[in-house]
Image (cartoon, rainbow, N blue to C red):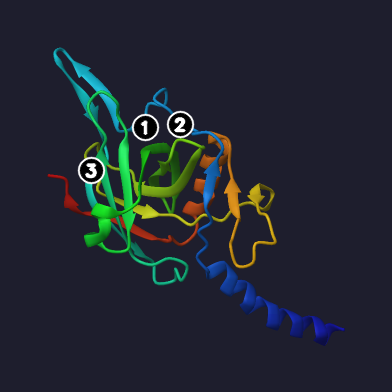
Amino acid sequence: MGAWVAASIALTGPVQARRDAEVVVEPIHSSLPLYNFAWEDLWPRGFANGDTFGCTSRIGFGDWRFTPAKTNLQQEEAWYRFSNYGVFHCAAVLARANARAKLGAAHWDYGFFVRLGKARYQSTQWELWALQGGILPGSNYTLLAREQKKAGLIVKFRVLQQRCPSDMIRESRGLDVWSTRYCAIDSRAELLSLARRMLDLPGAGEIARVYGAE
């Protein structure tokens, strides 16, 4: 019996280690947007100063490149174009393509960058962020993080894993190879809690601005 237990540990241990090292990025969706302009750290947002008004953002507009981590076998390099919607109504226009040359004709949606909160990791203070994409029906989320620094234009993020708690998984079977699985999160507290846990794991990659908006 003792020999069988030892053999089982030897066989399952490395398998579990490989699963822990695997990068997991599951789609996160909320039935309604979790953040609005009542949230102080939602960008872009409106400003008014005397006769001057418009939209301002802590995140730099332009073309950004996502570079997956070497251990991230789930995702490939991608390009994003973040631009400002307008002056009277503030939102980011989010476009994605697998090559920068394709961004002009890429599918796009409205969205916002949201600073969720803070967390400490390996004696360093981090800011936890999310890209809130889409408005109707609901929003999708990409978890991000950056080391806490002085105020200024943000042009780079660490992209976090998205390992969904089992009780939040939504999935319908019977559609052949078409996946319906996603992570249903419908409160700010749940999203912040997940982001804090994901900060302790190896990142999914990095997204950084390569070309600033003209």
Q: Assign a secondary structure to mark 2.
A: loop
Left or right: 80 in relation to 184: left
Tell me how far mark 3 sits from mark 1, CA to CA.
14 Å
Q: Assign a secondary structure to mark 3.
A: loop
Q: Are marks 3 and 1 in contact (CB under 8 Å)?
A: no
Looking at this view, is 173 or 208 the one in front? 173
* Crowdedness near tag 2: few (<14), some (14–19) or many (≥20) residues, C-alpha within 10 Å: some
The quarter of the picture where the N terminus appears is bottom right
Residue occupying the point 45% across, 36% down: 135
Q: Position of residue 59 (x, y in %)?
A: 27, 41
- Residue 35 badge: 2
* Crowdedness near tag 3: few (<14), some (14–19) or many (≥20) residues, C-alpha within 10 Å: many
Residue occupying the point 27% across, 54% down: 105
- The residue type indicated by label 2 comes to Tyr
Q: Is 88 situated above or below 28? A: above
Label 3 belongs to which residue? 60
Residue at the farthest top position: 50
- The residue type indicated by label 1 comes to Leu
Q: Is 12 situated above or below 62? A: below
Residue occupying the point 75% across, 81% down: 8
